[in-house]
Image (tube, rainbow, N blue to C red):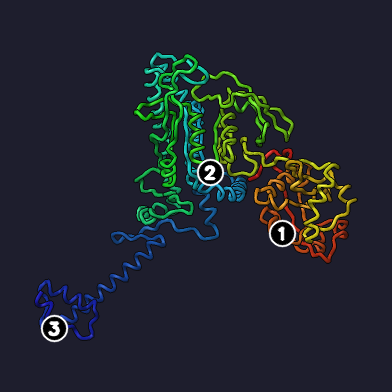
């Protein structure tokens, strides 16, 4: 070490040569006076090191090109295909999960779904899974939970409420026990309560195990998510999304499952007690839902499971009605949607795609039920009908899924959805397509919409006059309005017209929207969207494929709803019929907007709201 400190720097030597000299000195070959032979040896060592470094770099470059050198032997690995045949080579060497003809459909689906992906991101959804689906032998639970995992990875906050009727019955049968139902509630004896605990635990474990299934490692590896995943995950652990929740973790290091599931004592209950001389024993009623704890877990990107067990203040465990639990959880969380899975009994009702609620629109025929999952939600008889299509739907409380959907919607949840569990992918087709696949229940956004009649003439003039005076609409004579009165769609509220739209047929498959007005007091209630959606359904139902409109000031609003700008209207030769072109006032310089309607789903006006 002393010799190293005294060593003079060889003249003309590089830092690499100095390091080489010091390396020599440690082996006893250093000459204190720095003889020429030592310098020559040092220089040769430095050159050898430099050449070795260059060789290693060349070896790395050769390895990246597909050449591997090992023990003096050279083996050529498969080279990367050229850009011209890369796609074909990849498809030839890999299993095709879909045919080439299906690829455009996949692209089309994502383009159609993109507005809904953004709209549902960060929203709170409650999913209700009745107990009879847990024991389904057709694989309904597996498909359902696969959709749940994908939905959670799309940024939706999920709370899963699961029933246990079939599981409880199965355990009771194994125990040789039987229980009876009174007014829709199981009389839960002490021995039956043991079966309830066992069934609830087994159901929870079954769901947790299925949601712990990892995505195929190869698909994640293809996009590089397996590299440095732990480092990225730790650096982004504190990152928060705009809605306050933690982004989904795509770590493939197998340190945690892809979907994190939690459950707990979120439901506080009380004994149902003695009702009508019947002692329900360990059957409970929901007293309160610990919403803050559930929301906290969902903010951490965890799926929360709530079952039929409720806990009392004294520490007892009670058997609660899972439909009642779903209703109370939806209320407590102020959920954006309640999604209810159902089986064949509800499917046989042939429910419409959309049920709009308004005062005295729906009525129930009450009847006895016999299931933990059944709930007599509505006791009084009301008229259940669909005023838009004229179809009458007869439903009783023995079909609790529809009862729950209507009551929860009436209690403040904006949308409830009924989905057939036997249909693969039904959840995505319902939430991420315009017309959906199941039945949606909502407050009647089409309330008061109808075709105009001659008695609306005076009110229609009053509604149009302010917009005509402002120059937003063209002046129409009274005679024109009288002639077109039956082509108007109007919104009536408490005897007053608050909106209107004129739909005229100008060609075999082309219609024109005009005189589109919503009173300024109601423009913040999405009345314009509902009116436009209603008119588009009306146009599709009459065979129209394209809608046009001429406007000078409202083009941005229609462009945001799918209309495409086509330039100045009076110059649109080849787009508009010549007869219509001749009637356009060139001095207004109106802009032409065109929208091609999606005609794959044709239904009567008001059959489905598109947002």
Which image quarter: residue 189? top left
| Towards the viewer: 299 or 18 | 299
Q: Kindly identify which residue carries mark 1.
A: 555
The reply to whether residue 213 is visible in this rendering is: yes
Task: Residue 553: give x, y in percent of width and height.
Answer: 73, 61
- Residue at x 66% of width, y 24% of height: 394
Determine the secondary structure under disc 3: loop
Gap in angstroms between the C-alphas marked 2 and 1:
43 Å
Q: Residues within 10 Å of mark 2 (few under 14, many from 20)?
A: few
Q: Give the side of residue 223 with respect to residue 600, left or right.
A: left
Which residue is at the far bottom? 11
Which numbered marker is on residue 332?
Answer: none
Gap in angstroms between the C-alphas marked 1 and 3:
87 Å
Circle 2/circle 1 CB separation < 8 Å: no
Q: Kindly identify which residue carries mark 2.
A: 97
| Towards the viewer: 551 or 312 | 312
């Amino acid at each position: 070490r002393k010799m190293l400190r005294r060593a003079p720097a060889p003249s003309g030597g590089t830092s690499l040569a100095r390091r080489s000299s010091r390396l020599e000195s440690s082996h006893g070959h250093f000459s204190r006076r720095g003889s020429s032979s030592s310098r020559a040896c040092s220089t040769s060592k430095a050159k050898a090191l430099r050449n070795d470094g260059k060789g290693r770099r060349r070896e790395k470059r050769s390895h990246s090109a597909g050449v591997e050198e090992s023990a003096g032997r050279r083996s050529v690995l498969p080279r990367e295909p050229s850009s011209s045949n890369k796609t074909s080579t990849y498809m030839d060497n890999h299993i095709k999960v879909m045919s080439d003809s299906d690829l455009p459909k996949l692209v089309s689906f994502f383009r159609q779904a993109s507005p809904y992906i953004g709209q549902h991101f960060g929203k709170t959804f409650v999913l209700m899974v009745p107990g009879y689906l847990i024991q389904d032998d057709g694989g309904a639970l597996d498909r359902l939970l696969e959709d749940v995992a994908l939905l959670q990875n799309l940024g939706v906050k999920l709370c899963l409420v699961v029933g246990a009727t079939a599981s409880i019955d199965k355990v009771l049968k194994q125990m040789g026990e039987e229980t009876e139902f009174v007014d829709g509630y199981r009389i839960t004896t002490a021995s039956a309560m043991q079966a309830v605990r066992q069934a609830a635990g087994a159901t929870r474990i079954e769901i947790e195990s299925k949601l712990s299934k990892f995505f195929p490692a190869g698909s994640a590896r293809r996009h590089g998510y397996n590299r440095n995943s732990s480092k990225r995950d730790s650096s982004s652990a504190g990152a928060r999304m705009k809605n306050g929740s933690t982004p989904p973790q795509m770590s493939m290091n197998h340190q945690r499952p892809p979907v994190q599931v939690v459950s707990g004592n979120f439901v506080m209950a009380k004994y149902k007690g003695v009702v009508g001389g019947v002692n329900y024993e360990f059957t409970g009623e929901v007293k309160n839902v610990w919403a803050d704890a559930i929301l906290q877990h969902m903010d951490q990107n965890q799926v929360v499971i709530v079952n039929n067990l409720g806990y009392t203040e004294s520490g007892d465990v009670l058997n609660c009605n899972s439909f009642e639990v779903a209703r109370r959880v939806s209320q407590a969380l102020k959920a954006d949607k309640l999604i209810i899975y159902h089986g064949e009994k509800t499917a046989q009702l042939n429910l419409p795609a959309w049920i709009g609620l308004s005062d005295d629109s729906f009525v129930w025929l009450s009847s006895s039920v016999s299931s933990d999952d059944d709930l007599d939600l509505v006791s009084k008889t009301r008229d259940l009908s669909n005023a838009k299509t004229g179809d009458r739907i007869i439903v009783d409380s023995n079909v609790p899924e529809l009862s729950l959907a209507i009551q929860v919607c009436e209690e403040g949840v904006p949308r409830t959805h009924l989905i057939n569990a036997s249909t693969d992918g039904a959840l995505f087709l319902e939430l991420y397509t315009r017309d959906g696949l199941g039945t949606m229940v909502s407050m009647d956004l089409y309330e008061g919409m109808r075709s105009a009649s001659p008695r609306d003439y005076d009110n229609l003039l009053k509604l149009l006059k302010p917009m005509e005076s402002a120059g937003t609409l063209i002046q129409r004579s009274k005679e024109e309005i009288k002639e077109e009165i039956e082509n108007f769609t109007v919104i009536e509220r408490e005897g007053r017209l608050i909106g209107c739209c004129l739909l005229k047929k100008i060609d075999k498959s082309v219609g024109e929207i005009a005189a589109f007005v919503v009173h300024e007091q109601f423009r913040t209630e999405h009345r314009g969207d509902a009116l436009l959606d209603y008119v588009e359904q009306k146009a599709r139902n009459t065979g129209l494929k394209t809608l046009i409109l001429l406007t000078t000031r409202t083009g941005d609003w229609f462009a945001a709803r799918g209309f495409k700008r086509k330039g100045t209207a009076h110059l649109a030769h080849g787009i508009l019929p010549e007869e219509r072109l001749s009637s356009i006032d060139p001095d207004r310089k109106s802009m032409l907007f065109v929208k091609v309607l999606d005609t794959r789903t044709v239904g009567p006006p008001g059959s489905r709201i598109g947002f």
